[in-house]
Amino acid sequence: MKTPADRPIGTLYLVPAPLDFSCSEQVPLDHVMPDHTLAAAAKLTHWVCENAKTARAYLKRLGEIYPLACTLQEMTLQELPREIHKKGDHQGQFDARYLLAPALQGHPIGLVSEAGMPAVADPGASVVRAAHDLGIPVVPLVGPVSVLLALAASGLNGQNFAFVGYVPSAPADRAKRLQELETLALRTGQTQIFIETPYRNTAVLQTLLQTLQHNTRLATSSGLTLDRYQGHSDLVKNWRHQPWTLDNTIPTVFAIGR
């Protein structure tokens, strides 16, 4: 694919989305994203997204703050393949170059995930990688990143940390994985950050309290940026004696360390 000589190559913009996806409440966009990010996103007419329907819903909210460059019906939205949603694209197995054809024709493109920063704890890395390979400029816009917000609120080591994605859903496998992460955290001092689908929040918390050592520190951040945000950080031995519960309807980020 080549760029016409009379048309400059387009830029790939990494556009953050609010963290309220699938939640019953929505946070005003201008409460969680800078004005510059909103203005830049409103100018885009070509998008790569996880799901076109939810991307249009986001753009509709954006259009209530800044006029969109064209109507939603005129927008060009390309979806990442469904298998990418389930398995991710962070290991380089997916060739996303075809999704960037509009940029090679001179159109700037927005990359957006369902929540937070695309390509961070969400699909999109393959698109960014392909942009670099094709010589397309990549510009990340400022917005919410749940992993970093949760880390900052945890009181755990913010100089050495790892996001390890989802933990297993099967109870035995989950317990084994959490023990492995705890061993690593206690041995190296590296904070271990992970997530699960919201309806398993309580199950994950129960496994943590049953599995971790009593002097390990556990932190949770639920509903980041929402009015009903709840964050808690304490030693496991104290967690076990407190009536602290997690809401199974809102996303939660977990972190363990020393």
Image (cartoon, rainbow, N blue to C red):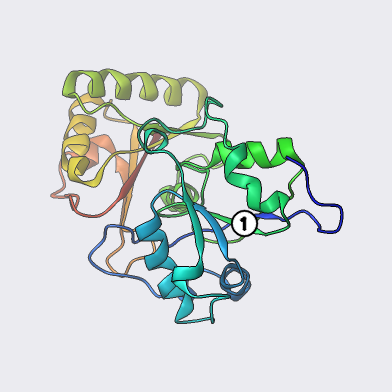
- Callout 1 secondary element: strand
Question: In terms of depth relative to the viewer, which is nearer, 36 or 59?
Answer: 59
Question: In terms of depth relative to the viewer, which is nearer, 107 or 223?
Answer: 107
Q: Where is residue 50 shown, x and y percent of the image? A: 42, 48
Residue 101 relative to residue 136: left or right: left
Q: Quadrant of residue 208?
A: top left
Relative to 147, say whether 107 is above or below: below
Q: Quadrant of residue 96?
A: top right
Residue at (54, 61) in percent of width and height: 143
Which quarter of the rendering shows the N terminus? top right
Relative to 147, say whether 171 is above or below: above
Question: Crowding at label 1, few (<14), some or many (≥20) Cα neighbours within 10 Å?
Answer: many
Q: Where is residue 26 shown, x and y percent of the image? A: 32, 70
Residue that sits furthest to the right in the current view:
5
Q: Is residue 50 visible?
A: yes
Q: Quadrant of residue 67?
A: bottom right
Residue at (23, 41) in percent of width and height: 238
Q: Is residue 19 visible?
A: no
Residue at (77, 53) in percent of width and height: 9
Residue 195 relative to residue 160: left or right: left
Q: Where is residue 194 shown, x and y percent of the image? A: 38, 36
Question: In terms of depth relative to the viewer, which is nearer, 258 or 16?
Answer: 16
Q: Of the residues shown, which amino acid type is indicated by label 1?
A: Ile
Residue 240 relative to residue 31: left or right: left
Residue 24 relative to residue 118: left or right: left
Number of numbered markers: 1
Residue at (26, 29) in percent of width and height: 214
Relative to 72, say whether 64 is above or below: below
The residue tagged 1 is 109
Which quarter of the rendering shows the C terminus? top left
